[in-house]
Image (spheres, grey):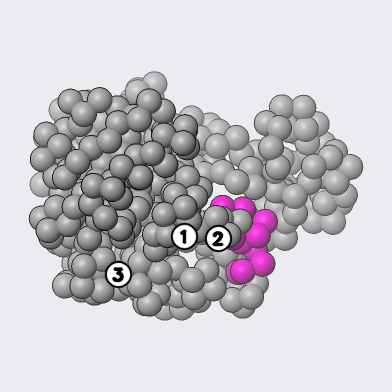
Amino acid sequence: MNVVFLSPHFPPNFWPFCVRLREAGHNVLGLADVEYDALRPELRQALTEYYKVSDMHHYDELVRALGYFTHRYGKLDRLDSMSEYWLETEARLREDFNIFGLRPQDMDRVKRKSVMKRYFQQAGLRVARGRICRTAVEAQDFIEEVGYPVVAKPDIGVGAAKTYKITNDAELMDYIATKPPVDYIMEEFIPGKIITYDGLTDIQGNVVFDSSLEYSKGVMEVVNQDTDIYYYMVREIPEDLREAGRRVVQAFNVRERFFHFEFFRLEDGGLVALEVNMRPPGGLSIDMFNYANDMDVFKEWVNVLTHGRVSQQAQHPYFCTYVGRKDHIHYKRSHEQVLAEFGPLIAHHERISGIFAGAIGNYGYILRHPDLPTLLQAAQAIQERA
């Protein structure tokens, strides 16, 4: 196959996708706007060819690049970046070069939170009441209907960027005065914790790998309050979550893709569908898939492309936890003390790219253990303040 990988160097932990593609015998065609010599050596060795453009936002340059690849290698079979940021660019390129995958007509349902709600409801799932409010009057009318508190967030957006929790009239006025000039959706506040249903589908839309995350607190709270977070992968996915997640897979026609779906778990045990993301969960979560299951999910994605199936079923032998720390917070334990005290639990640790730091911290640790309380005690100790 001829596989074009946009931005193969970023996120920095995604380079194994290209390595596994090359190991399987495919042509891996890298396309980005950084110098070839800036790519890590393993990535350079994996690329059949690399095409540098001056700016990835210049669509005509991307078209020329794909034209060159087509002339050189023939029909392009797949194109991806695994990133939310390039989803619309990828869709346009797939349309222009007739490549399998999401197309421009799919973008509203996978990018706009207001449209997602309709698909959730068609799948028989509960959603938070919400609507796009473009004026102060529309916002006040909605709040009269549902009451405070409400949450306002970009209709198209990712990572809790510029998200507001509004609890009174003064905060509403502040929101109206400071919100960016894009469509915002306002929703009733749901008192519950966010859980996810994540995984990978084959070309028929069958889920061939799945997983679930639970969080210590909401990402909106972490970003807005500039605090820290930990989250963990469960060993057993609740059956109601798996059933709801698979209904979402069908409703959104997710084929040969990673996915990351978010739900609220209510205090009464019920589920409310929140949003879909047509990519792996962010940060180091894809590495956590591997550590939680003693498997290579990068390779299994390539197996799905190559053979239409995975070679290994996830057994979930470990709980796996990501623990983030922020540079501005003074912690009780130094980095060296964390490694000394929790070394047997730590599978991986690294500095986090600045673009993700607001949500998941400047430094991250991945811990794993069959016993959840052991992991959570370690996570809380690593984040303990001085």
> What is the x, y in percent for residue 64?
38, 39
Question: Which residue ends up furthest to the front in the rendered image?
Answer: 71
Question: Nearest the camera: 24 or 136?
Answer: 24
> What whole-number distance in Å separates the C-alpha atoms at marks 2 and 1?
6 Å
Question: Nearest the camera: 137 or 229?
Answer: 137
Does residue 341 sit above or below 114 in this rendering? Answer: above
Q: Can residue 248 be seen in this view?
A: no
> What whole-number distance in Å separates the C-alpha atoms at marks 2 and 3?
23 Å
- C-beta proximity under 8 Å, tags 2 and 1: yes
> What is the x, y in percent for residue 12?
26, 37
Does residue 217 sit above or below 264 in this rendering? Answer: above
Question: Nearest the camera: 309 or 333?
Answer: 309
Q: From the viewer's perspective, is the residue at label 2 or at label 3 nearer?
A: 2
Going from the N terminus, do you reach mark 3 or mark 1 first?
A: 1
- C-beta proximity under 8 Å, tags 2 and 3: no
Q: Which residue: 47% across, 32% down?
A: 58
Q: Residues within 10 Å of mark 3 (few under 14, many from 20)?
A: some
- The circle on residue 106 is 2
Q: In which quarter of the image is residue 255?
A: bottom left
Q: Which residue: 49% across, 71% down?
A: 253
Residue type, mark 2 in image: Asp
